[in-house]
Amino acid sequence: MDRIRITGGRPLTGTIPISGAKNAALPLMIASLLTEETLTLENVPRLADVALLQRILGNHGVDITVPGKRPGDGQYQGQTLQISAARIVDTTAPYELVSRMRASFWVLAPLLARVGEARVSMPGGCAIGTRPVDLLLMAMERLGAEIDIEGGYVVARAPRGLRGAEIVFPKVTVGGTHTALMGAVLARGTTVIENAAQEPEIVDLAACLTKMGARITGAGTPRIVVEGVTRLSGARHTVLPDRIEAGTYAMAVAMTGGDVLLEGARPDLMQAALDVLVQAGAEVSANNAGIRVSRNGAWLEPVTVATAPFPGFPTDLQAQLMALMARAKGSSRITETIFENRFMHVQELVRLGAHIRLEGDTAIIDGVERLKGAPVMATDLRASVSLVIAGLAAEGETVVHRVYHLDRGFERLEQKLAACGAAIERLSG
Ligand code: UD1
């Protein structure tokens, strides 16, 4: 298994191109199931999760082609995918594939909307446990689907098609909102989604669906209204930039000091994170090219932050902020309100010398002057990149094991950081 070796202590200086957002690319690819025409997606990041979803869609009969480079294409452009679900040949999403990536469960909605049936494995491990899908199923039932659980699979049927309804989410859910949207666009009549997630990735999906002929208003607000249409057409859409990737590198620069342009990053997608960085002592400015983050040698200031649905501080940047606060001058408090047990990185950060203690859903971080390199273990996608951030500032050598977690969500991480002066390399095998 690959590892990443970092020798800490170097500032980051230069330009980091920001990739297309993983969390937008995945639902956009899934939306291809809604039409027999070709959906062309540009700026799709080259990530393990994207490759896995290609396989999952392939199993339903979806053809995906990746055209070669065109004259004038830059070296680091995301890929263009031409996705054609002309004929759905199989409505089963098998356990072996779905268990490896939760978001693949979202194929349930477009399969139901397009062909009236779907058989999708419950996501692995945490089925109706800590990361349940009850609200996604509730949304489909509201739209008229009949749902049974058989042998670990959700079997959903809507023989007479889906019909518009009012869907009120008792808690904000990104996946629930994506699936409600994808179900509603081809349903008969009007659907109103209340307490909808407002994440930029929802807005991006709604924008693409609208290009395909869907009638959607209110995406990006808590109330989305969808007028169902009978069919959708193909479209061409560019995936929006990854605010989590941009926020991660912004934290890395705040951690090491230096001056980096996050090329293509959009401040309107990540204001809460930028505000926290400024509070911590980083300098942040935005222009047409992207977001520039810098910090000179001054101490980091501690912060008090609670994660929240958009436009609040994202849970997907919580671990990275904790790494940053490990070296602040004083005591920080970070409260995780979205997911239980999303503190797996704490013990690993402690191995690097951080002083962190947990009180329920709050981590209290007493900043230390120095972190010291050590072997550490990546436990999930965002946690693992927090270890990279800490390693960039730790004295000596840090080796991050199990980096396949990183490959799920960060495109060319080592190359992007090395180009800005970090001593970081991948050790294969
Ligand atoms: C998405 C993101 C993930 C991010 C999360 C929150 C993708 C591919 N993943 O995950 O990176 O961390 O949003 O911003 O976009 N819940 C239920 N029942 C359900 C569904 C969710 O109780 O049926 C709960 C979850 O356990 C969690 C909360 O709702 O406590 C929010 O989860 P949700 O927004 O659905 O996360 P995902 O869509 O899985």
Image: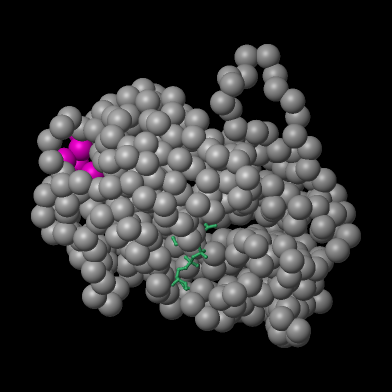
Q: Main secondary structure of the magenta part?
A: helix
Q: Is residue 157 above or below residue 51?
A: below
Way the structure is coloured: one colour
Q: Is residue 242 magenta?
A: no
217 versus 134 height, above or below: above
Q: Is residue 381 above or below residue 147?
A: above
**Between 149 and 375, which is closer to the camera in this rendering?**
375
* Residue 310 in sight from this viewpoint: no
Q: Count the marks.
A: 0
**What's the residue at 20%, 37% (across, down)?**
282
In the image, taking residue 378 as reference, residue 74 lies left or right, namely right
Tell me the quarter of the image containing the C terminus: top right
Q: Residue 294: where, in percent of width, then height?
A: 24, 31
User: Does 39 sit left or right of 9 as displayed?
Assistant: right
- Give the answer, above or below, for where 253 lies relative to 169: above
Q: Position of residue 285 (x, y in %)?
A: 25, 30
Dividing the picture into quarters, in which one does residue 256 lie?
top left
User: Could you say which is closer to the camera, residue 424 or residue 301?
Assistant: 424
The magenta region covers 276-283
The structure residue drawn at horizontal position 50% and vertical position 52%, both measured from the top left corner, is 401
* Residue 170 position within the rendered picture, expressed as x and y whole percent measured from the top left: 43, 78
Question: Which residue lies at the image location 50% right of the left edge and 30% below the top edge?
Answer: 415
Q: Position of residue 68 (x, y in %)?
A: 74, 25
Whether residue 64 is visible, yes or no, is: yes
Q: Which residue appears at 40% of the width and 65% of the height?
A: 344
The residue lying furthest to the top in this view is 71
Image quarter of residue 358: bottom left
Drawn side of residue 264 relative to residue 163, left or right: left
